[in-house]
Image: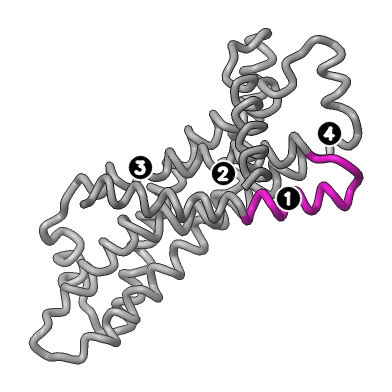
Amino acid sequence: MLKLLKHLGLYFIMMQKVLSIPEKWSAFKKQCLLELEKVGLNSLGIVVIISFFVGGVVSIQTAFNMTNPLLPKYLVGLASRDSLILEFSPTMISLILAGKVGSSIASEIGSMRVSEQIDALDIMGVNSASFLILPKIIAAIVFFPFLVIISMGIGMVGAWVGGLSANVTTADFLYGLKYEFNSFYITYAIVKTLFFAFIVSSVSSYFGYFTRGGSIEVGRSSTKAVVYSSIIILFFNFILTKLLLA
């Protein structure tokens, strides 16, 4: 319990330093653009591949379990749509990005800590926490929703392909996609994604920023960042689902 309180205290102290006005806007903008590429664009490939195949698997499994001839075929499209929008794209993609982006952030900042680059920034009077971490948080909050929206679209394409292989016609599948669509589902997914983006970027930065030791500790910090980010995402997923959909 005391260890948890210690980590919470250090986290909020770090976030107080992070959420401060940047000293040099030109350097800050350049850093933000760099992080947009590292956090967002470099994650596009894995998001597209995973979303396509998971969408296909969801539709095939749904069609396989609909053995009752009274159940209409368009339910495959309906089930695939709701599964992708409500849970897979916002939550599972965020967990995947916690592994890819989170470990990268923790190892990058951790390496700078053990090589004393962060200490050098502090000695020069630079707010190292804000300079290194705030652009990563902004990049994640800006780009994660785009990745999730792309995941929804690609996932539905994969679901359509999977449905064709399970003898679901394009007309039935498209009817299911449009059937009683609730636009609030998109809002719900984006709201969750914004929370998850902040969790991944800030928690991973915390473990990297407070790394002590050598290269082995950098690896441990990277592992802790992924594990704790994933646990916190699942916890907030439950809370947000209860608040937004209950």
Dot 3 or dot 4: first in sequence order is 4
**SS at mark 2 in the image:** helix
Answer above or below: position of 165 versus 216.
below
Q: Which percent across, then down, holds residue 149?
A: 38, 47
Which residue position holds label 3?
A: 190
Q: CA distance from mark 3 to mark 1?
A: 26 Å
Which residue position holds label 4?
A: 113
Which residue position holds label 2?
A: 200
Residue at 86% x, 23% y is 119
What secondary structure characterizes most of the magenta part? helix
Callout 2–callout 3 Cβ contact below 8 Å? no
Of badges 3 and 1, nearer the viewer stands 1
Q: Crowding at label 4, few (<14), some or many (≥20) Cα neighbours within 10 Å?
A: many
Q: CA distance from mark 2 to mark 1?
A: 12 Å
Magenta range is 211-227
Dot 4 or dot 2: first in sequence order is 4
Which residue position holds label 1?
A: 222
Q: CA distance from mark 3 to mark 4?
A: 33 Å
Q: Which percent across, then down, holds residue 198?
A: 51, 37
**SS at mark 4 in the image:** helix
Q: CA distance from mark 1 to mark 4?
A: 13 Å
Q: Is residue 220 magenta?
A: yes
Residue at 91% x, 34% y is 115
Answer above or below: position of 23 versus 77.
above
Dot 1 or dot 4: first in sequence order is 4
